[in-house]
Image (cartoon, rainbow, N blue to C red):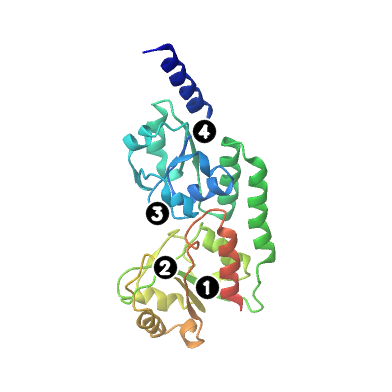
Amino acid sequence: MGIKTVFIIFIFMLALWGNERIVSLSPSITEIVFALGEGEAMVATSEYSLYPKEAKKLPLIGGYSNPNIEKIISYQPTLVIGQDFNLATLEKLQKFGIKTVMVRLQTLDDIKNSIVTISKNISAQTNADTLVKEIEDALKDAKKAESPHSVMIVYGLKEDLRSGIYIAGHGIFFEDIIKACSNTNAYSSELLSQPVLSYENVIALNPQQIIILHSKATEPDVDVDKALANWYSIPTDASKNKKISIVDESYLHIPSQRVALTIKRLCREMND
């Protein structure tokens, strides 16, 4: 190997060592890194990282609940960012000398704190201040209820309501948003943070408003009219007062900086 070749390899390695190489283990983290202005440092991400559009071009390291350790290592990351449920994966990566950061993205405060934590680890604190302020402004400006009422937020639209109905419980950003809009979560039990209800449970809760989070991208075959009619057949105050609606926005399920949009959208839906 000639001196020139060795020199070129040396320069390449210096460049590799000098640049951040980030792997994200969830779509939310991917969105935050891009929003902080460090998207070009991303070398791989998890499945379902669809925003921004540049994220779709990144190699995948598996699902966010089961990332592939070998694939992650193969991208020679200088930093791997995961959520609290990725703890086992992050601990394994640390044994290979890879720097890791773990964040929690359950509540609105979690999301804001995580934006700041990630920004400090990729030197983008100034952008973090802007993103956090957008969330705080959305909360401050959110439309408040003139007549506060109970709201049940449902995950996903389906025609058969005899099987499990997943709803927003406690300790999650959807409940924070319900309260920020001056309403109350229809789910009052302290047992579960993300409960699964039966048809009979919904009747017992008797919510005054039901908001169903639907995605045509992940639920393309649902007959929307039939599903909505089935919801209206359940004897609740929401049905009686014609306060059952479907919201389909790509950002609703993602606890990233775009939760500012979710706050605005859901508060309008609750209080218009």
Question: Distance of mark 4 from mark 1, alpha carbons?
Answer: 44 Å
Question: Distance of mark 3 from mark 1, alpha carbons?
Answer: 28 Å
Q: Residues within 10 Å of mark 3 (few under 14, many from 20)?
A: some
Tell me the element at label 2: loop
Mark closer to the observer (4, 1): 4
- What residue sits right under mark 3 in the picture? 48
- What residue sits right under mark 4 in the picture? 20
Q: Nearer the viewer, residue 217 or 18?
A: 18
- The quarter of the rendered structure image containing the N terminus is top left
Question: Distance of mark 2 from mark 1, alpha carbons?
Answer: 20 Å
- What residue sits right under mark 1 in the picture? 151
Mark 4 and mark 2 lie on one chain; the one further toward the N terminus is 4
Q: Percent position (x, y) of residue 172?
A: 51, 58
Question: Distance of mark 4 from mark 3, alpha carbons?
Answer: 23 Å
Q: Nearer the viewer, residue 157 or 173?
A: 157
Mark 3 and mark 1 lie on one chain; the one further toward the N terminus is 3
Labelled disc at residue 215: 2
Mark 4 and mark 1 lie on one chain; the one further toward the N terminus is 4
Q: Is residue 122 left or right of residue 199?
A: right
Q: Is residue 6 above or below residue 199?
A: above
Mark closer to the observer (4, 2): 4
Q: Is residue 195 above or below residue 20?
A: below
Mark 2 and mark 1 lie on one chain; the one further toward the N terminus is 1
